[in-house]
Image (cartoon, rainbow, N blue to C red):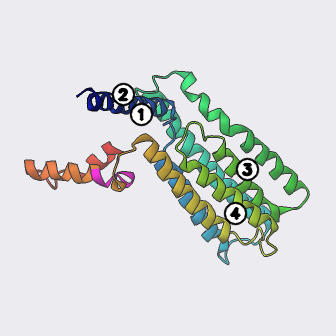
């Protein structure tokens, strides 16, 4: 009967087209960002907020600005060091400078954020800094929509929405860092998961914490009878 055969061929052709589209999308995705490093940056932001909330930390705008600049420095060094490591040693990158072009998309919003920060500091408008940072950082996430999974839209909306709230809410002050620390903590961990699953779409959740690799290693050691042998050195090798 030709009818079912034709239908079968059509379904097979559609399946191949979908598979090809999926491969094209995966090839276009940028996988140079490190999910774990981004999550680490969010953790640093939360720790810094906790430190600045302490009674021992100076309650001055300059001191708190220095604290947030330290967070920025750690995040920039960490993320771009991971990006450089990927560029130099990942076979997919091939040390081809053109592979780094997608990272330029996020630069304009971040530069504007830096300029606005300078203006707000000069005009003594410190309370507007958190909202401006969140909004511009959200726009930087939006700018990566072509090279990252669709979930980056939700993350960009998260930052822009909360940034607007911080700009207009009367109780937001620069000397109360905890709300901003929580926003960046949850946002950067969400971004970390997005980056991680962009690299490894089918990986289990435990792979983000490197649990799966350690479990597999311990299983192999158990089979060979070397369970307790030099565990510390093996962890260093993995990192």
In space, the residues marked 4 and 2 are separated at their CA atoms by 45 Å
Looking at the image, is 180 positioned above or below residue 236?
below
* Front of the two marks 1 and 2: 2
Is 201 within the magenta? no
Q: Which residue is mark 1?
A: 18
Q: Residues within 10 Å of mark 3 (few under 14, many from 20)?
A: many
At horizontal 45% and vertical 34% (from top left) the residue drawn is 26
Q: Residues within 10 Å of mark 2 (few under 14, many from 20)?
A: few
Mark 4–mark 3 CB contact (< 8 Å)? no
Quadrant containing the N terminus in the rendered view: top left
* Front of the two marks 3 and 2: 2
Q: Which residues are magenta?
A: 207-212
- Identify the mark nearer the N-term, 1 or 3: 1
In this image, 97 relative to 210: left or right? right
- Identify the mark nearer the N-term, 4 or 3: 3
Q: Which residue is mark 3?
A: 136
- Identify the mark nearer the N-term, 4 or 1: 1
Determine whether the residue tagged by mark 1 lies in a helix, strand or loop: helix
Q: Which residue is mark 2?
A: 13
Principal secondary structure, stretch drawn in magenta: helix
Q: Which residue is mark 4?
A: 162
Mark 3–mark 2 CB contact (< 8 Å)? no
Mark 1–mark 2 CB contact (< 8 Å)? no
């Amino acid at each position: 009967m030709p009818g079912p055969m034709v239908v079968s061929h059509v379904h097979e052709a559609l399946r191949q087209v979908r598979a090809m589209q999926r491969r094209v999308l995966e090839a276009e995705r940028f996988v140079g960002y490190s999910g774990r490093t981004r999550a680490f940056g969010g953790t640093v932001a939360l720790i810094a907020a906790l430190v600045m909330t302490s009674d021992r930390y100076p309650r001055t705008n300059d001191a708190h600005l220095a604290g947030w600049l330290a967070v920025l420095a750690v995040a920039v060094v960490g993320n771009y060091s991971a990006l450089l490591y990927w560029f130099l040693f990942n076979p997919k990158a091939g040390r081809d400078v053109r592979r780094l072009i997608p990272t330029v998309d996020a630069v304009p919003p971040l530069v504007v954020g830096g300029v606005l920060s300078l203006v707000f500091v000069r005009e003594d408008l410190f309370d507007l800094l958190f909202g401006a940072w969140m909004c511009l950082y959200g726009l930087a996430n939006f700018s990566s929509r072509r090279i990252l999974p669709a979930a980056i839209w939700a993350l960009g909306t998260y930052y822009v929405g909360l940034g607007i709230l911080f700009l207009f809410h009367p109780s937001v002050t620069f000397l109360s860092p905890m709300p901003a620390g929580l926003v960046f903590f949850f946002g950067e961990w969400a971004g970390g998961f997005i980056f991680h699953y962009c690299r490894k779409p089918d990986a289990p959740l435990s792979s983000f914490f490197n649990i799966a690799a350690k479990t597999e290693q311990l299983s192999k050691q158990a089979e060979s009878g070397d369970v307790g042998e030099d565990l510390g050195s093996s962890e260093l090798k993995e990192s």
